[in-house]
Image (cartoon, rainbow, N blue to C red):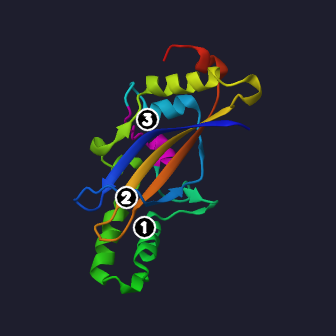
Amino acid sequence: MKRFILDIAYLKKDLDKTIKIDTNYHTLQLDPICIDEHTFKNIFYQSDNFGIHTDEEFYKYITFCTPWRTVCCLGFSLLDTIMSNLEEDLNVTRNCFTTESIIELSKEISNIKTLCDIPLFNAVTLTWPQIKHRIREKYINTSDANKFDKVELIITIVFKVRMEDTLATHVKFTYIIDVNEEWIINDTC
């Protein structure tokens, strides 16, 4: 199985109110989410521009919660991931954090259930025509022996905690869509 991988959105949730440039960060790749192109477009591209449709039928595709989100087939916890990264960055256990700070972080993270809970005003995204163009261009310029049959569209969410000497946590949602050659070669969007 050959795949073409394309980052399509970068969403950021500042947990601190300052903006810093980080070249180092923690990355967590969630287990892939298989989805058909029609459902993907209904969730993220009801127009040419990126947005997130909140219909309840799409919850399983956009939630951070288990059982839908896993890492290596194990349940995923956003809070535990961020806390573990803080422990690693600071070389201390979470027992060293104040109870107040753990509770405050827990409250803030517990309010993040889906991608809809991440503000889009910091988002950097591709439009649907740009995505189709990139896929089409790659597909046409790939030899028949190396044609891909799946496309991975990746949405990265960045979490940065208000604490010196800590790195941001990048959580990647990977959506796998089967390639439809007619869809790719057709130049319409």
> Which contiguous range is marked in magenta?
50-62
Mark 2 lies on a secondary structure that is strand
Instruction: Tell me residue 88's x, y (percent).
Output: 46, 75
Q: Earlier in the sequence, mark 1 or mark 3?
A: 3
Q: Residue furthest left?
A: 17
First in sequence, mark 2 or 1: give its number.
1
| Residue 32 higher or lower than 90, as above or below | above
- Does the image show residue 112? no
Q: Against 80, is 38 above or below?
A: above
Q: Which label number is shown at residue 135?
A: none
- The relative height of residue 6 versus residue 156 in the rendered view (above or below) is above
- Mark identifier at residue 44: 3
Report the mark closest to the observer, 1 or 3.
Answer: 1
In the rendering, at what x and y percent does residue 189 appear?
A: 48, 18
Q: Residue at the location (28% across, 72% down)?
A: 104
Distance of label 1 from label 3 (alpha carbons): 26 Å
Residue bearing the label numbered 1: 82
* Residue 92 on the magenta span: no
**Residue type of the residue flagged with mark 3:** Phe
Q: Please provide percent x and percent y for residue 1.
A: 74, 38
Q: Are marks 2 and 1 in contact (CB under 8 Å)?
A: yes
**Which of the 4 image quarters holds residue 149?**
top right
Q: Label 3: how many residues lie within 10 Å, few (<14), some (14-19) or many (20+)?
A: some
Label 2 belongs to which residue? 159
Question: Residue reaching furthest right?
Answer: 145
Q: Secondary structure at mark 3?
A: helix
User: Which residue shows up at 45% across the image and 70% down it?
Assistant: 85
Towards the viewer: 85 or 44: 85
Residue 118 sits above or below residue 66 on the image? above
Q: For the point 45% across and 63% down, which residue is it?
A: 78
